Amino acid sequence: MRNWITILTAMTFLGGFGLSKFDSKPESKAFKEIPVMKVNVYMMGREEVDPSITVKIFENIDYLNEAFEGQINFAFNELFMDVNHAYLPDIYAGFKEGKDEIVQPLVDPIEKEGAINIYLFDTYLEHGSSAALMGFTPLLKAKQETYSMNSPRFDRILMAYDGLEENKTLVHEMGHFFGLKHPWEITTFAKHRLGIKTMNDEAKNHMSYGSDVERFTPQQLEDMRNYALKYRKYLMDRVVKVYAGV
């Protein structure tokens, strides 16, 4: 029998963007739809609450809202603990082979639908590697319009506990969740369209790796907002209309 408990329920916030201030604008003005996405977090392989980890979780969600600059908002929903565990590199190896034998038995009894589910696992340094895996996001390579029909299998982000330390792993993986690729995976033309025009732009972009990453471009933020409205709407808590000028 599973030994898991719900720690926190229905704590919701919008990261301090003050969206309600736009409600009084005239209907004749231009409005923009801002998706508000619910987030569940699952602490795997943990029997007791570790306050230092829970603090990091909330810091990461706060930073996530800062990084998305109000174009998508993330509302914390529930936090779970589960004593069953696996190692992130082992789960990723299975995912690359198209197998879910490791992760599926772990998540089936506890996974909630209707939210972005973030799973935290321990990681390790693989032989011959200079860095441990910090996170990955299972995605459909095509037919993104079928995400809702495949829910909740592709509503997950899998992260290492260590990935919480600098707040940037979750932002990077959320970029993938909303359709962004690494800069080196796309053409020069595509990078320029996204506002990534120099080596410095690329080095500082959240979809790159490294200690200098710090921002998305306005074009990336707009692409992710549109992606959420088109392909991830089934996960939304709500859509807020904000005044966007004329």
Image (cartoon, rainbow, N blue to C red):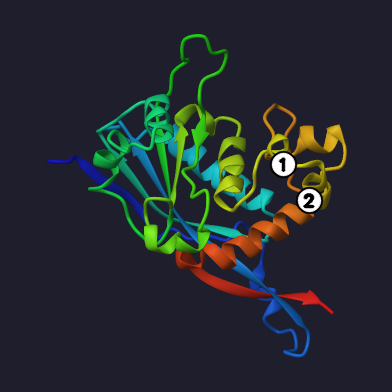
Residue 186 - label: 1
Category of crowding for the residue at label 1, using alpha-carbon neighbours closer than 10 angstroms: few (below 14), some (14–19), many (at least 20): few
The N terminus sits in image quarter: top left
The C terminus appears in which quarter of the rendering? bottom right
Question: What residue type is disc 1 on?
Answer: Ile
Q: Could you tell me which residue is drawn at 61 percent across and 56 percent down? A: 15
Residue 8: where, in percent of width, then height?
A: 36, 51
Q: Nearer the viewer, residue 143 or 184?
A: 143
Residue 27 shown left or right of residue 87 in the figure: right
Q: Is residue 68 above or below residue 231?
A: above
Q: CA distance from mark 1 to mark 2?
A: 10 Å
Location of residue 24 with respect to 136 vertically, above or below = below
For mark 1, give the secondary structure. loop
Q: Residue at point 48% right, 61% down?
A: 12
Residue 2: x and y in percent read: 17, 41
Label 2, secondary structure: give it: loop
Which residue sits furthest right?
Answer: 198
